[in-house]
Amino acid sequence: MEACNPASDHKSASVIEDGGEVKVHVFSSSSELLEKLHEKWLGKQQPYPAMYSSIFGGIILDPAMMVIPIDDHMVHRGHGVFDTAIIFDGYLYELDVHLDRFLRSASKAKISSPFPRSTLRSILIQLTAVSQCKKGTVRYWLSAGPGDFLLSPSGCPTPAFYAVVINEGFSQCKEGVKVITSTIPMKSPLFATMKNVNYLPNVLSKMEAEEKGAFASIWVDEEGYIAEGPNVNVAFVTHDKELILPCFDKILGGCTAKRLLELAPRLVEQGRLKGVKTGNLTVEEAKGAAEMMYVGSTLPLLPIVSWDEQPIGDGNVGELTLALSDLIWDDMVAGPETQRLCVPYL
């Protein structure tokens, strides 16, 4: 959980060059190691005000101690799942739907929780309260746990639960971005529909887009239908003013995307949209849409104006895209108690 440091810092901390021969430093005591860990945070703003670890059995405020064991199977085997909740103006937004998805992912990954759902929820609320963070995210993981370096988790005494609060600023996205079609193979439905920590395809897909001057990418499934972005859902407004999101059977069911589907009928009632649905779209149909957007928790809605160097619609951020963005943003700011939980800060 440490912040990135220049490569030269890592070198000076780990090796000493003596006449061309490399000598690795050996830390003689835990106090010496802890001192070195604290050095990395000197003069830096703390982006992670609090972490919870079931391994330690409590909340950690010292960033130097925000670590997980290297023999945790989530680290070396990728046997773990995660999820995120937004902290916005002192409220946890959509905590319960994210927590429910989290436990569904854990079940698919055959990871049991060390605590019942009510305890997990209480830990996340207490962690957020202790952190004093009013705007950011709380991210949490269930792992098969530490134990050994084998493939099977049978040697892990108990699963592990970790969570961290991250200070992050949020603002409503109103500027459009460019995207590309990813050439990185997307995950199979089994892995795409569970939010697991195996995100290498997602990372490579994002990097591919950035290398081509785009914000992110779009995955197309083996049948030629639009799937999703690297860590977000995607939505379209047709020229007939119908909002369409790809079906969730082969991709992750985004909590924000599903909330958008619940809120968007308000625009139908106003006569601004003609319909709201999920369905299959070919690349040709999708690129021919009037408007396009990414939908995800930390965005929560990001307009897309160009795809593979071709404009979407007239190449400008669409009026209905902004209207849909307002629906989600207003829900985050002043939505019902079912969506927003007031954090009991200490």
Image (cartoon, rainbow, N blue to C red):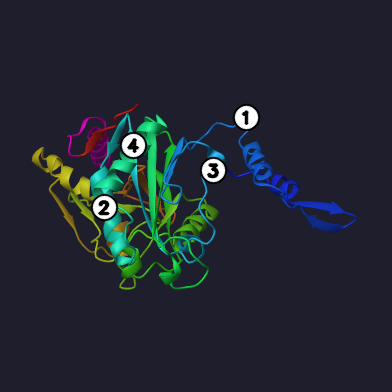
Circle 2: is it few (<14), some (14-19), or many (20+) Cα within 10 Å? few
Q: Would residue 174 be visible to someone looking at this image?
A: no
- Provide the residue designation for mark 2: 116
| Mark 4 or mark 2, earlier in chain | 2
Q: Closest to the observer: 26 or 184?
A: 26
- Residue type, label 4: Gln
Residue at label 4?
A: 126
Residue at the image position 24 percent from the left and 33 percent from the top: 330
For label 1, the residue is: 43
Q: CA distance from mark 4 to mark 1?
A: 28 Å
Return the residue found at the far right.
19
Q: CA distance from mark 1 to mark 3?
A: 17 Å
Q: Position of residue 291 (x, y in %)?
A: 29, 48
314 left or right of 62? left
Residue type at numbered disc 3: Met
Between tags 4 and 1, which lies in front?
Answer: 4
Which of the numbered marks, if any, corresponds to residue 35? none
Task: Quote the CA–CA distance across marks 4 and 2.
Answer: 16 Å
Res 197 → quadrant: bottom left
Pointers 3 and 4 in contact (CB under 8 A)? no
Q: Position of residue 68 (x, y in %)?
A: 50, 52
Q: Are marks 1 and 3 in contact (CB under 8 Å)?
A: no
Mark 2 or 1 closer to N-term?
A: 1
Q: Which residues are magenta?
A: 319-338
Identity of the residue drawn at 35% across and 52% down: 232
What's the CA distance linking mark 2 and mark 1? 39 Å
Depth check: give the residue in front, 221 or 212: 221
Say whether marks 2 and 1 touch (CB < 8 Å). no
State yes or no: residue 327 in magenta: yes
Q: Residue under circle 3? A: 65
Q: Are marks 4 and 1 in contact (CB under 8 Å)?
A: no
